[in-house]
Amino acid sequence: MKTIEESVVTAMDGSDKELFPYLPYILQDLWEIGTDPDALIKLISKHFASCAGLKVLDLGCGKGAVSVKVSKSLRCNCYGIDAVSEFIEYAQQKALEFQVEHLCTFETGDIRERVKDLSGYDIIILGAIGPVFGDYYTTLTSLSRCINKDGIFIIDDGYIENNSNYSHPLILEKETINKMIDMAGMQLIEDEIIHRDDIKVSDDFIFVKLKMRCNELIEKYPDKREIFFDYLKKQEEENEVLENKIVCSTMMIKRKN
């Protein structure tokens, strides 16, 4: 099993775990660093007649943008966990700023361990965190104890179109994902495709910020320049994949009736 530091760096499209302590600095200009909160708010509103009081578990919550905005808009009770303590501190500040500190709880921790003690959630969000729990079958079955009978998983991820010539070590074909969901005793009830133009606009905005901060770190720590150069290169490669090679979507999954 990867260390939590390795998992976090992988989720951030990096390849060197030595990058981990520098992530708060690199990402300091960004709050929404994964899933689009507004898209989730629309999806949750569509599938629940009443949202107030719903229990939401946000795994790998980053700086809490999803939890804070979902709780503010829908009055859900959100519990976010992330391995980066600086992200959690920022999330707590944002909860206060948005006046939802009574609805949001944030904790620093290893989500792979914490979920063993959690249950009773209506919604579990896995927002662009990669295969931290393994493949779809392993993820859904291992987290099934945490979610209510009629609960919903929301997974922000990318997949390769069926019969595509493209392959990626961490990205599966849609057909494979569907089979794993079925094997887990669940069904895909929503597959909200993210438009490529929107992805590019977001990628370009984020990359400018990341590049600026990485260049500052290169000046400050010239002996570690290769770590930051490599990260920027990986970001460019992954942006190319997200924008041109795969389908990015927000999937909603629940148990079969």
Image (cartoon, grey):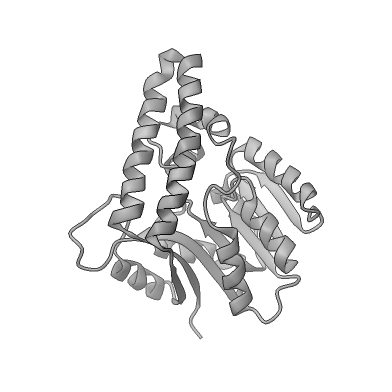
Name the residue nearer the viewer: 175 or 27: 27
In the image, 131: left or right of 103?
Answer: left
Q: Is residue 227 above or below residue 176?
A: above
In percent of width and height, residue 213 lies at 51, 28
| Image quarter (top left, top right, bottom left or bottom right) of the N terminus | top left
Q: Quadrant of residue 120?
A: bottom right
Name the residue: 59% across, 46% down.
62
Total numbered labels: 0
In percent of width and height, residue 10 lies at 42, 42
Name the residue nearer the viewer: 158 or 186: 158
In percent of width and height, residue 150 lies at 60, 78
* Residue 111 at least partly seen: yes
Name the residue: 54% across, 47% down.
33
Name the residue nearer the viewer: 103 or 202: 202
Q: Is residue 204 above or below residue 101?
A: above
In percent of width and height, residue 104 lies at 74, 55
Name the residue: 42% across, 55% down.
199
